[in-house]
Amino acid sequence: MEIQNKKWDIKKFNEMRQEVLNQWPTGKEVDFEEALRYHQNLPKNQIMTNKLKEAASKNNTLIQPRAGVALLEEHIELLRFLRQKGKADVLPTTIDSYTRQNRYEEAEKGIRESEKAGRSLLNGFPAVNYGVQKCRKVIESLDCPVQVRHGTPDARLLAEISLAGGFTDFEGGGISYNVPYAKKISIEQSIYYWQYVDRLVGIYEENGVSLNREPFGPLTGTLVPPCISHSIGIIEGILAAEQGVRNITLGYGQCGNLIQDVAAVETLKELSAEYLKDYSVMITTAFHQWMGGFPQDEAQAFGVISWGAATAALSKATKVIVKTPHEAFGIPTKEANAEGLRATRQVINMLKDQRMISNKELEKEKEIIKRETRQILSKVYELGEGDWAKGAVRAFAAGVLDVPFAPSQYNAGKILPARDNSGAVRFLNFGSIPFDDEIKEFHRRKLAERAKAENREVSFKMVIDDIYAIGQGMLVGRTD
Ligand SMILES: CC[C@H]1O[C@@H](n2cnc3c(N)ncnc32)[C@H](O)[C@@H]1O
């Protein structure tokens, strides 16, 4: 199929809608007119765009966990606990892996087995299997907005059911929920599926219901250079806005060097405003605490969590996505999840009246990220002959967009990141990323400084050392 970045007409959308709603029996519960009325009657404090707008206007950083379990009552109890004991400003519902792969039969089995076992045997909430009315039970048990967080290349039915179910924010995108999550789904296919999701959000917006969309910024969450996640986030923002989305949160995964991370959030705000200026959208930012390997020791994990909280506060991100001291092990207990939130809250509160000292290093880093991102995006636009959807597909084929350590067979996987002597993420291999020579020289010089300081050659070994460094208590993967 040949996709294009053009707003779908309602006829095309409605033709596909019947097929989507028939994918699982709960699709029959979706009645769009009734869903609109449901949203119009939602309490104001449960509408995500209100909460984001207020935070952005006050330069506040909202705190949000990830959380999702198999059983409905347990999931409600978990979210209420994180709100009350974790002081979460906004809540998630993390969806299970079967649902993310549209394997609803197995999700159904997972629910039954969890009921028998009396505990969650799924790694998230199977929203499609529960359907609209049970999603509303979750929403009606809470007093704040709730966002669907997942990793679904084909999220059409999940969007229909969860949005009709009262969720007011939907994470993901046609690139960010394909390339880091799937192996064999083409970029065209996932962008096409996500145009449906964004068109659905656009129809809600056209009927006066504001919903937020959040492309998944961190991607593979492992040493992803800011320009890579910015380029993909901005493209997904443009594709969403074209379908009528009016509220977009762009995300960024912490790398660990303070100056680079603050520069990343500040440039994400500037660049997204520039590239989305033709659309009237509200743009906010989400800072993800370190998404790579975590230390097993809980005290050290709190160090990583607090460093992420500090960077989020100093970058004035609208939202920080919080990790837990169980990160190295897997799904956290509700107590550990709440502890991660409280540690984050403490640091946000201590830093909210402070600001990042502006200096020439920060300005240099911002200039680098803006130049890199612009060089990538102008090549994408050129490859697409002015069409961002076509451009994205062709850019991945050409390696102009390339995500480090991504499983997708449509991803070139030629770039290699490594930290420089201050821990900032640089390019060791550029693959086919279209940087000019000056930018390439900058990265080579930065890595050479580290090589000299460590008395070793710039090499792939640095990449491996950096991947394990934070889990082993460091930032830069120094050889002993
Ligand atoms: C994107 C990966 C992140 O999502 C987290 N995660 C995935 N599923 C859940 C879950 N069900 N509850 C809490 N955290 C979760 C995981 O620990 C990791 O930090």
Image (tube, grey):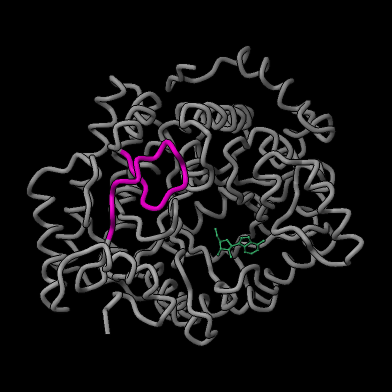
Rendered location of residue 190, percent (x, y): 52, 32
Occupied quadrant, residue 71: bottom right
Left or right relative to 55: residue 42 = right
The reply to whether residue 364 is visible in this rendering is yes
Q: Which residue is drawn at 76% across and 29% down?
A: 23
The C terminus lies in which quarter of the figure?
Answer: bottom left
Magenta residue check for 397:
no
Name the foreground residue: 431 vs 208.
Answer: 431
Name the foreground residue: 171 vs 35.
Answer: 171
The reply to whether residue 45 is visible in this rendering is no
Magenta stretch, main secondary structure class: loop
Rendered location of residue 400, percent (x, y): 28, 37
* Bounds of the magenta segment: 401-417
Q: Residue at x 57, y 29 (%)?
A: 193
Magenta residue check for 413:
yes
Q: Quadrant of ligand 1?
A: bottom right
Rendered location of residue 267, percent (x, y): 28, 52
Occupied quadrant, residue 146: bottom right
Left or right relative to 232: residue 380 = left
Rendered location of residue 217, percent (x, y): 44, 51
